[in-house]
Image (cartoon, rainbow, N blue to C red):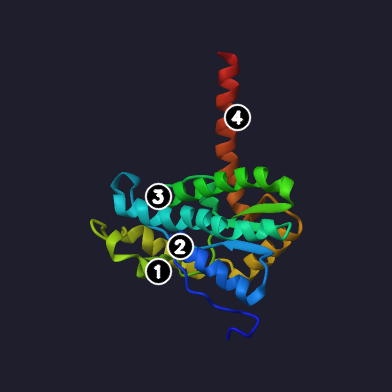
Amino acid sequence: DVGGDVVGIPADVSSRYSLDAAAQRVLENYGRVDVLCNNAGVVVLGALADATAEDWRWVMGVNLMGAVNGVAAFLPHIRAQGGGHIVNTASTQGLSASPGLGVYTASKYAVVAYSETLRLELAPENIGVSVLCPGIVNTKILEAARNRPAELASGTSAPPSPLLEALKPAVAHGLDPARVGDLVLRGIREDAAYILTHPESRAAFSARATAIESAYDELGRS
């Protein structure tokens, strides 16, 4: 119902044209944009060396370019009204890597870097930028292939069943999306650079950070 509080607008986040049209619809219905959440995400499973060109184009087109296109479509309107907040969804996979999720992980590392840079550049304009890095959330991301364009499906093999089967119960028992929403709202209000959801993911990030620190220490000894 266009006259209600919520208006659903179908859009292809990998298309700048589609998001430009969505932005126009939003303005027609609400008159302004205070918060932009770029949240669309898809995943392919399997060894990184086996990923196809179609895998890369699909995942990067949604996960990274979805955020880029969203910002491009909505930022001019946020600027025009003098401020607002942008939330880009990455993942704990954007903070530390693990096998079997390489294409997804690469896209999420890119979203983290994109968001960090955007935050630095937009801060003087009273526009906040946060990057959401959730762990496993109870969503339908493992069913993302249902929306995969036919032109990006060629040459793609089925996901390896062991990893897929291992992830299914974990996702089914993942964090309630409503809880993530609460954390995002708090992050927006506090202008947090990073919004995290799973304390247990800290260990993997700390191991990565320690390895980088150790490399710097070794450089200082050389």
Q: CA distance from mark 4 to mark 3?
A: 26 Å
Q: Residues within 10 Å of mark 3 (few under 14, many from 20)?
A: many
Residue wearing tag 3 = 103
Q: CA distance from mark 2 to mark 4?
A: 43 Å
Q: CA distance from mark 1 to mark 2?
A: 25 Å
Inspect the image, locate mark 2, and give the three-letter code of the amino acid beneath it. Answer: Tyr
Q: CA distance from mark 3 to mark 1?
A: 16 Å
Question: What kind of element bears circle 2?
Answer: helix
**Which-is-in-front pick, marks 1 and 2?**
2
Res. 143 mark: 1
**Mark found first going from the N terminus, 2 or 4:** 2
Q: CA distance from mark 1 to mark 4?
A: 38 Å
- The residue drawn where x is 50% and y is 46% is 110
Q: Is residue 127 left or right of residue 101?
A: right
Question: What kind of element bears circle 4?
Answer: helix
Inspect the image, locate mark 4, and give the three-letter code of the amino acid beneath it. Answer: Glu
- The residue drawn where x is 59% and y is 15% is 221
Res. 17 mark: 2
Question: What kind of element bears circle 3?
Answer: helix
- The residue drawn where x is 56% and y is 20% is 218
Q: Is residue 203 left or right of residue 152?
A: right
Q: Is residue 129 above or below residue 161?
A: above
**Mark found first going from the N terminus, 1 or 4:** 1
